[in-house]
Amino acid sequence: MVKMIMHGCNGRMGQVISSLAEEMQDIEIVAGVDIAGGQKNAYPVFETLAQVNVPADVVVDFASAAAADGLLDACIEKKLPLVLCTTGLSGAQLEKVKAASAQIPVLRSANMSLGINIIEDVLRKISGFLKESGFDIEIVEKHHNQKKDAPSGTALALADAVNDGLKERQPYVFDRSGRLQARPENEIGISAVRGGSIVGEHEVIFAGTDEVITIKHTAYSRAIFAKGALCAAVFLASAAPGMYDMGDVIG
């Protein structure tokens, strides 16, 4: 059985993952890390990963970008594989993630759901043909009013997947306010909506002349991300050092 540490255990996703892990046969959460209290957990909780003294095989992170540097340092020190789910990392932090992957297995994905990762594969296959056929490309993402980063990491990952299928990469445009001109042909617009308790909704819009193709994914529960994270943890626990994504888990 894989022994896992839940980094960010008292957050929303940490609690969903903890609950779901109890129903799985091949993984067990043996410790948690969080500076926030107020939750009853079936495992010991520490303020930092460096303080954890419980043997483990892998770490799953759903904390905050502010904690990423210390998390990476501790994982390297303890030689622990890391499933990194936190979004909003800086360029410097992403470089640090890449450097860490030379020493430990790191799986980083903007979205842990099966559906989003399948959509990314579809976008790589169709975006080039549609772009050459004159379709404009726009992405709209919607999340709850407590989400801090915008646009979402998933929206950027979808945009990257679109670009992977194009002959020439297109720039991303996040704000058109004050720009008095028609939409340029070569750009990908990305819009963010924040409100209520929306778990997550992403639309990739291919708008052509007299027709529109929309590829949409809606998350109705955080359980889909939790399941993906736990599957990734089982996969990564026995992996060699390197960078991985959900495509490796799905196969």
Image (spheres, rainbow, N blue to C red):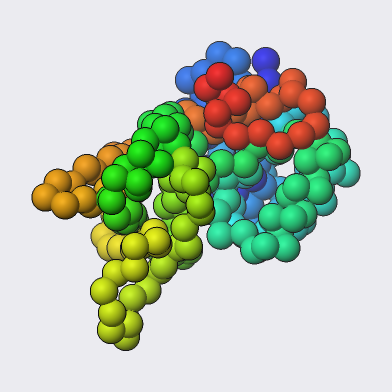
Residue 21 relative to residue 32: left or right: left
Residue under the image location 16 percent in, 52 percent down: 209
State the quadrant of the N terminus. top right
| Residue 200 screen position, x and y as percent | 34, 48
Residue under the image location 78 percent in, 40 percent down: 101
Answer yes or no: is residue 5 visible.
no
Residue under the image location 57 percent in, 51 percent down: 86
**Residue sitting nearer the eye, 202 or 173:** 173
State the quadrant of the C terminus. top right
**Residue sitting nearer the eye, 166 or 91:** 166
Q: Quadrant of residue 248?
A: top right
| Residue 58 screen position, x and y as percent | 71, 31
Answer yes or no: is residue 241 visible.
yes
Q: Quadrant of residue 141?
A: bottom left
Residue 66 relative to residue 182: left or right: right
Residue most toward the left? 210
| Residue 64 screen position, x and y as percent | 59, 57
Residue 132 relative to residue 90: left or right: left
